[in-house]
Image (spheres, helix red, strand yellow):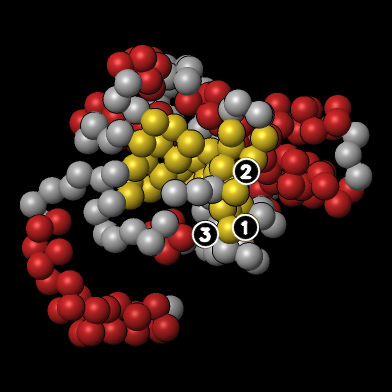
Amino acid sequence: MHSIRKGVVTFQRYVFPQHKALFSRLALGQTPAALFITCADSRVDPTLITHSHPGELFVDRNAGNFMPPFHGENASEAAGLEYALKVLKIPNIIICGHTDCGAMKAVWHPERAKDLPSVTRWLTNGKEARRHVMAMKLPEDQQLNAITQRNIVNQLQNLRTYPVVRHALEAGTLDIAGWVYDIEHGKVLEYAPATDSFEILRA
Ligand SMILES: [Zn+2]
């Protein structure tokens, strides 16, 4: 805990004063450019990899970057989504997975999470991706990558089950994108619906 506390003091002493104008503005409200749904993994830093600043990304994180489909239930992901679109009127949603994802490994090998009942329940959100990749009969070294990518495609589909998302897409006020961040190389692959594949993200 000590290093974290020290970090707070360092932020207050050295970082905050350099961005005082920005924080004064942010104290009055937020207008984020994107809802960024990503994994809880400590190696994924949304503001760093998008070169963003405080106030620009509305971040929703969970193990496996899932967005469960709309059931009308009071899930936290659904609440975040509703607030982001209806109140903040955020015009972009990015669902971002990553390489070496522990949640995706556990989706692929559910037996490894058998002593973790809450995790097991949560990871059933990845069962469609698992079924899809199982049927592809890929070599072992391609399986994790494939399930990580397929999971993004499925979460993008789940997004469209929310009336608030469908309406915004139909009105042309919302863009959605699916990414996979490559931790080792700093690259981002983006889902291209036209080819149903992932391609290097370009500006
Ligand atoms: Zn992860």
Q: Within 10 angstroms of label 3, few (less than 14), some, or many (20 or more) residues? A: some
Please identify the quadrant where the N terminus is shown.
Answer: bottom left
- Marks 3 and 2, how far apart at CA: 19 Å
**What residue appears at the point 33 percent right and 46 percent down from the top-left corner?**
58
110 with respect to 100 (left or right): right
Name the residue that disc number 1 marks. 182
Could you say where residue 46 lies in the image, as x and y percent from the top left? 43, 56
199 with respect to 111 (left or right): left
Q: Give the residue type that dot 1 points to.
A: Asp
Q: Quadrant of residue 9?
A: bottom left
Q: Earlier in the sequence, mark 1 or mark 3?
A: 3
Image vertical order of residue 13 relative to residue 133, above or below: below
Q: Of circles 1 and 3, which is in front?
A: 1
Q: Quadrant of residue 79?
A: top left
Name the residue that disc number 2 marks. 199
Q: Foreground: 66 or 168?
A: 168
Image vertical order of residue 53 relative to residue 176, above or below: below
**What residue appears at the point 36 percent right and 41 percent down from the top-left corner?**
35
Q: Give the residue type that dot 2 points to.
A: Glu
**What residue appears at the point 68 percent right and 43 percent down from the top-left corner?**
148
Mark 2: which secondary structure?
strand
Ligand 1 within 8 angstroms of badge 3 C-beta: yes
Q: Give the residue type that dot 3 points to.
A: Val
Q: Within 10 angstroms of label 1, few (less than 14), some, or many (20 or more) residues? A: some
Q: Within 10 angstroms of label 2, few (less than 14), some, or many (20 or more) residues? A: some
Q: Foreground: 147 or 172?
A: 172
Could you say where residue 27 lies in the image, as x and y percent from the top left? 11, 57
Name the residue that disc number 3 marks. 44
Could you say where residue 174 lies in the image, as x and y percent from the top left? 34, 28
- The tag on residue 158 is none
